[in-house]
Image (cartoon, helix red, strand yellow):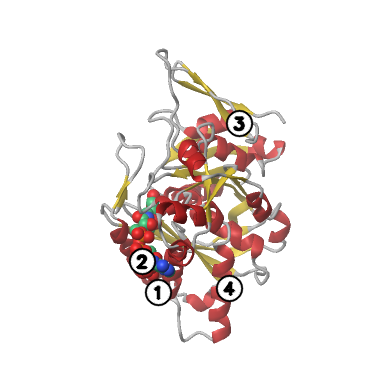
């Protein structure tokens, strides 16, 4: 049975900060961000945008009414949860009017959990081949003003429809995962921003990649020569570039090494403009690759490296399906170029604004006309979302 990604959609917040402006404000050499981290811009989410609104928007962009009647499971993978109890997937299910007899829940393990969600979706479709599973990876990466992580913030969601006989990418049966109980990046319940051992986290990312890749090749009897491209979790693209160099097989023909490098460059285009979106970063890289590479063809095998701090990593792969380009709706570079540019004071106000609840636990919000879905109000501690009429 062939199971995999039938549709893939993306949404981000409609405000953007240029990292050249951030570098100037923070007295950092701009090249440190543009060359040292390979980042250019990041999306800034206002208080009316969260994992539910972006997740619903990413999914709404790809789903038909027929899909909504055939979805049996909605999984939101996130580490930016909006409630300790109610899953964001339940809000998304409601906003999208998906048929009622569906299972909806949230999954968490830092940036990794969407990869586990895809594997669970695959198992579900194996048992019920006519059903579809909606997997959404949605997050807001917020490190705080004047922290080392500040240039790597971002916001966005990737939605994937997992089906039998998919029209974009067939998953191979080759996943290899690794777990390490470490403290490289974590966010206790009482903190709105994460604690980070920055350098240690980068070492763990690279070492997890190298060791999982060795095991993956051994168990699956493959090597880099079998792949047209490798997509990486993208906390910032420079770290993934270091990862590619680490696993690059110098004995490959130079043309293949160059092709892997060229496809890598296509895979980071969106991340360079959106920033880290945690669970969605790897899949934003895949989308960027699929929409922008001119060399990919039917049957090409793409490897994916997923990494979530804490830490869990996994490598798996997929095979491109004939006609996959027709399933991609739009080139997202255009959408990204239409976001509203923020000044530094506006970014500092917008990104870090918290809901100001009155004594009843209520607040109402404005200025969400440029969103597809919005957190419109909180009424006695209940979040109320709307589809924005245009
Ligand atoms: P930093 O202060 O920017 O570090 O923090 P740096 O001083 O080492 O500089 C970065 C690079 O810029 C270096 O290059 C410098 O040489 C270079 P490298 O040595 O790495 O090749 N540089 C320059 N280049 C050109 N011109 C210049 C110049 N100056 C310096 N003038 C750090 C970097 C990653 C620590 C910080 O951004 C951070 O804390 N980020 C958050 C944590 C993170 O992203 N970790 C990544 C691995 S963990 C992960 O991926 C999981 C995560 O997504 C969360 C989850 O799973 O939920 C984060």
Around disc 1, counting alpha carbons within 10 Å, would you say few (fewer than 14), some (14 to 19), or many (20 or more)?
few
Looking at the rendered image, the quarter that the N terminus falls into is bottom right
Q: Position of residue 313 (x, y in %)?
A: 38, 58
Q: Residues within 10 Å of mark 2 (few under 14, many from 20)?
A: some
The answer to which of marks 3 and 1 sits earlier in the sequence is 1
Task: State the residue position of label 3.
Answer: 368
Task: Give the residue pinned by disc 2.
Answer: 206
Instruction: Single out the mark in the foreground, 3 or 1.
Output: 3
Identify which residue, 94 or 266, lies in the foreground. Answer: 266
Nearer to the camera, 243 or 315: 243
**Residue at horizontal 45%, vertical 71%?**
244
Would you place residue 244 above or below residue 306 in this image?
Answer: below
Q: First in sequence: mark 3 or mark 2? A: 2
| Residue 216, image quadrant | bottom left
| CA–CA distance in space, label 1 to label 2 | 8 Å
Q: How crowded is mark 3: few (under 14 residues within 10 Å), some or many (20 or more)?
A: some
Apparent side of residue 326 relative to residue 194 in the rendered image (left or right): right
Residue 4: x, y in percent? 58, 54
In the rendered image, which residue does mark 1 sit on?
246
Q: Earlier in the sequence, mark 1 or mark 2?
A: 2
x 65%, y 55%: residue:
333
Which label was assigned to residue 262? 4
């Amino acid at each position: 049975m062939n199971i995999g990604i039938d549709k893939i959609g993306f949404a981000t917040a409609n405000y953007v900060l240029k990292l050249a402006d951030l570098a100037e404000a923070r007295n950092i050499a701009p090249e440190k961000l543009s060359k040292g981290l390979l980042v250019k811009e990041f999306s800034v989410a206002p208080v009316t945008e969260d994992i539910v609104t972006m997740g619903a928007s990413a999914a709404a962009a790809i789903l038909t009414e027929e899909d909504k009647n055939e979805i049996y499971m909605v999984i939101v993978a996130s580490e930016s949860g909006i409630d300790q109890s109610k899953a964001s997937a339940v809000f998304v299910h409601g906003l999208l009017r998906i048929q009622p007899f569906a299972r909806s829940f949230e999954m968490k393990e830092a940036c990794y959990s969407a990869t586990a969600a895809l594997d669970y979706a695959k198992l579900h479709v194996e048992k019920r081949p006519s059903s579809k599973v909606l997997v959404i990876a949605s997050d807001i990466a917020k490190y705080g003003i004047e922290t080392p992580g500040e240039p790597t913030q971002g916001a966005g969601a990737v939605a994937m429809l997992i089906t039998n006989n998919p029209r974009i990418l067939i998953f191979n049966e080759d996943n290899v995962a690794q777990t390490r109980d470490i403290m490289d990046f974590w966010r206790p319940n009482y903190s709105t921003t994460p604690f980070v051992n920055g350098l240690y986290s980068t070492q763990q990312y690279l070492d997890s990649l190298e060791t999982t890749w060795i095991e993956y090749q051994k168990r699956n009897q493959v090597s880099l020569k079998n792949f047209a491209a490798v997509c990486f979790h993208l906390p910032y693209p420079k770290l993934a570039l270091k990862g590619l160099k680490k696993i690059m097989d110098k004995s490959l023909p130079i043309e293949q090494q160059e092709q892997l490098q060229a496809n890598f460059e296509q895979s980071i285009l969106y991340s360079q403009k959106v920033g880290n979106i945690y669970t969605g970063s790897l899949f934003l890289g895949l989308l960027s690759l699929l929409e922008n590479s001119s060399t990919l063809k039917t049957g090409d095998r793409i490897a994916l490296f997923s990494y979530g701090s804490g830490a869990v990593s996994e490598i798996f792969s997929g095979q491109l399906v004939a006609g996959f380009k027709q399933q991609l709706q739009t080139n997202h570079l255009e959408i990204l170029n239409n976001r509203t540019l923020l000044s530094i004071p506006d970014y500092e106000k917008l990104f870090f604004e918290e809901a100001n609840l009155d004594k009843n636990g209520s607040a109402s919000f404005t200025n969400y006309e440029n969103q597809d879905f919005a957190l419109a109000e909180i009424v006695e501690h209940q979040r109320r979302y709307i589809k924005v009429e245009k």
